[in-house]
């Protein structure tokens, strides 16, 4: 396990290994997003009860799922950074935080748009909505805490610790519709139950979710590589790649 983590912690190995992945990730992400969103917004049948207003779920559900998944990956990166001092893990956590905050805001905003015709109001202090709002504040807190330190290492450690503390909110978000009586509907996808909607509706949603995940992976890799080049600008391997004498991506 240590050898595997140490291998991925090598800046040069990480940069040169992940480079060939990017065209495939970006291409697959764009294809799945276009297919899923266009299919869901324009082709899929309207919901029996919510009619065309339910089409926003093809954006709302992937954004909400990704907002939570992104924070979970940040927590794993924080553990790797705090335990093994691997700088790439910290860089990845740093670039994921704004993305996760954007996904959380997108989930809240699209949920508000959905709530107007469905619930008759754009906001209620529902357990799911409130816990997602708290998640947005945690994301912003992690970003702000990192930026508040003049020392990059101190800011990285503080952000990692706050990320691990903030993980406690993830099970609250997930099980809020089970633990409390809420307006928000239960999970759309479940590992132990078949989807309640027909295939003509859940298939485009699945494409959209997968597209969002691949977009997240492509974005994180791209931004992490860019930040890594900035931090390692004076390293020999960066100069070799810049001069074309090293193994380029």
Image (cartoon, rainbow, N blue to C red):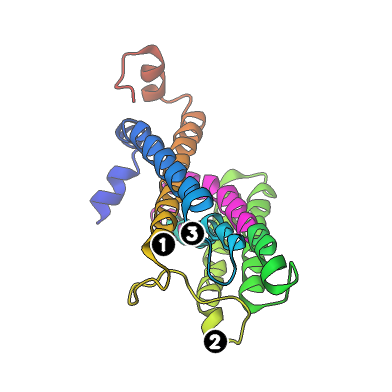
Q: Against 183, is 200 above or below?
A: above
Give the CA separation, mark 3 to mark 1.
11 Å
Mark 2: few/some/many CA within 10 Å (<14, 14-19, 20+):
few
Q: Position of residue 197 (x, y in %)?
A: 43, 69
**Residue 45 image label:** 3
Instruction: Name the residue tied to disc 1.
Output: 202
**Does the stretch in magenta take in 87?**
yes
Q: Main secondary structure of the magenta part?
A: helix
Q: Which comes before the other along the chain, label 3 or label 2?
A: 3
Instruction: Name the residue tied to disc 2.
Output: 179
Mark 1: few/some/many CA within 10 Å (<14, 14-19, 20+):
some
Say whether residue 154 is visible.
no
Q: Nearer the viewer, residue 56 or 102?
A: 56
Mark 3: few/some/many CA within 10 Å (<14, 14-19, 20+):
some
228 to the left or right of 133: left
Label 3's element?
loop
Of badges 1 and 2, the one in the foreground is 1
Q: Which residues fall within the magenta stretch?
A: 79-107
Position of the C terminus, as image quadrant, is top left
């Amino acid at each position: 396990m240590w050898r595997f983590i140490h291998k991925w912690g090598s800046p040069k190995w990480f940069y040169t290994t992940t480079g060939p992945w990017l065209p495939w990730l970006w291409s697959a992400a764009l294809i799945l997003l276009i297919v899923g969103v266009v299919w869901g917004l324009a082709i899929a049948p309207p919901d029996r009860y919510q009619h065309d207003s339910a089409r926003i779920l093809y954006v709302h559900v992937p954004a909400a799922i990704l907002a939570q998944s992104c924070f979970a990956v940040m927590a794993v990166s924080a553990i790797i950074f705090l335990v093994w001092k691997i700088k790439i893990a910290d860089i990845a956590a740093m670039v994921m935080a704004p993305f996760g905050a954007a996904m959380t805001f997108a989930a809240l905003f699209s949920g508000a748009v959905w709530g107007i015709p469905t619930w008759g109001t754009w906001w209620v202090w529902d357990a799911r909505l409130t816990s997602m709002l708290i998640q947005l504040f945690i994301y912003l807190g992690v970003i702000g805490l990192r930026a508040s330190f003049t020392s990059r290492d101190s800011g990285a450690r503080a952000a990692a610790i706050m990320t691990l503390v903030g993980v406690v909110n993830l099970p609250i978000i997930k099980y809020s519709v089970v633990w409390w009586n809420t307006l928000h509907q239960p999970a759309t996808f479940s590992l132990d139950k078949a989807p309640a909607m027909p295939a003509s509706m859940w298939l485009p949603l699945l494409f959209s979710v997968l597209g969002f995940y691949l977009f997240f992976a492509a974005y994180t890799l791209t931004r992490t590589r860019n930040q890594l080049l900035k931090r390692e600008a004076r390293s020999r391997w960066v100069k070799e790649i810049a001069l074309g004498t090293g193994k380029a991506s």
